[in-house]
Amino acid sequence: MEPIDCYKTYLSVKNHFSKENYDFFKYNGKTKVSQKTFYSKKDRFWFEKLSRQKNENEIVDFFVSNYSSSDDPSNLWIGNIIKEGEKIYDDWKLKKENLIDIFQKEVHRKINKENFNNYFSVINNRHPPILKDYLTKEISIETLIILDKILNFKTDLDKKLLDPIWQTISLKIKKYSPFLNINIFKYKKVLKDHVL
């Protein structure tokens, strides 16, 4: 992988996670950057280093893991990614390998038959329990996305919660969801077995 390609991937993942109107998949991960622009950047050596360490598929996953973990993707700088990114990437890969177990544990701990409907409900414009559990890190962004893929609760919350905290999380769900390739039927079964 060439350093400029690494930089283009970085920009396209960053734009995907931080800009409403950019879609990594629609543009096939492409972004326009000239050689001259790239070589005039002071931080290009980070991309030269990364291009030697990772192949094309790994670099996409590396950046996705870091941006999906960030509270503010628009301010995530490559220097911070280089310092902490490898650990975040390793943790993310481990999480993906054990995702069904993580989902099962988080659902088992937080959702039951009695609280199922209320868990996703907005009452008096207050955050629903699912959102509070995400904010306190009792459930992961992946569990949030999987539950949305099963129940489509995000659409309802988007209408009812006019709240900057929810808007940020809603955007993260929307942007991270296409990168989370899962067999949704397995997860539906886990949820169904638990709440019925």
Image: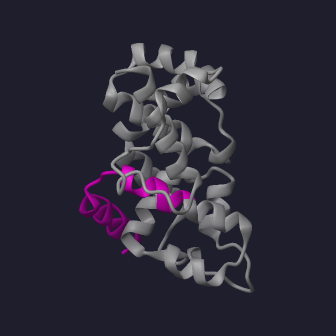
* Residue 93 appears anywhere in the view: no
Image height of 135 relative to 150, above or below:
above
Residue 124: percent from left, percent from top: 74, 86
Q: Which residues are magenta?
A: 172-196
Residue 30 placement: quadrant: top left
Residue drawn at point x = 42 percent, y = 57 percent = 177
The kind of secondary structure the magenta stretch mainly shows is helix
Residue 146: percent from left, percent from top: 41, 60
Q: Nearer the viewer, residue 48 or 105?
A: 48
Residue drawn at point x = 59 percent, y = 52 percent = 18
Colour basis: one colour
Image height of 117 relative to 77, above or below:
below
Residue 160 placement: quadrant: bottom right
State which quarter of the image contains the C terminus: bottom left
Q: Nearer the viewer, residue 55 or 145?
A: 55
Left or right of 23? Residue 164 is: right
Residue 104: percent from left, percent from top: 41, 53
Residue drawn at point x = 45 percent, y = 35 percent = 8
Residue 171: percent from left, percent from top: 56, 62
* Residue 179 appears anywhere in the view: yes
Count of numbered circles on the image: 0
Left or right of 166? Residue 141 is: left
